[in-house]
Image (cartoon, helix red, strand yellow):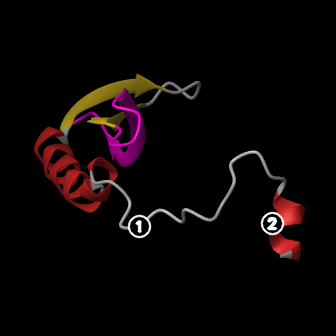
Amino acid sequence: MIGSLQAKKLPSGKQYYYARISYTDPLSGKICHKCLATGLETKNNKRRAEQVLMELLDTNAYLKQPPKQLNANVDPHIKLTCYLDR
């Protein structure tokens, strides 16, 4: 799991830091990206934004782990309403 900071300029003219998290999906093996707002302006907040990025990497560590157990009884081609009627 890798994270980076990106500055985005909003229509109001202010720039904010966004955390971009890249991880490999455990089921498909594809690289996925997630962009999360830090809520910090770019001016004088670089170190604080890096701390927020590390916290976000810790809280989103579950993304790179496969699910605990998959239910083998679910048919992927069945409609949700039919599944709930069982």
* Above/below status of 63 relative to 42: below
What is the magenta range? 25-43
Res 2 quadrant in image: top left
* Residue nearer the viewer, 83 or 29: 83
Packing grade of label 2 (10 A; few <14, some 14-19, many >=20) is few
Magenta-span inclusion, residue 27? yes
Q: Residue at x 88, y 63 (%)?
A: 82
In the displayed structure, 47 sits above or below 32; it is below
Residue 62, relative to residue 3: is it above or below?
A: below
What residue type is disc 1 on?
Answer: Gln
Residue 13 spot, x, y in % from top left? 50, 24
Label total for image = 2
Q: Secondary structure at mark 2?
A: helix
Dividing the picture into quadrants, the one containing residue 37 is top left
Residue at x 35% of width, y 48% of height? 38
Task: Please name whichever residue, 22 or 67, is drawn nearer the observer in this view of the structure.
Answer: 67
**N-terminal-most mark, 2 or 1:** 1
What amino acid does circle 2 point to? Tyr
Relative side of 84 to 62, left or right: right
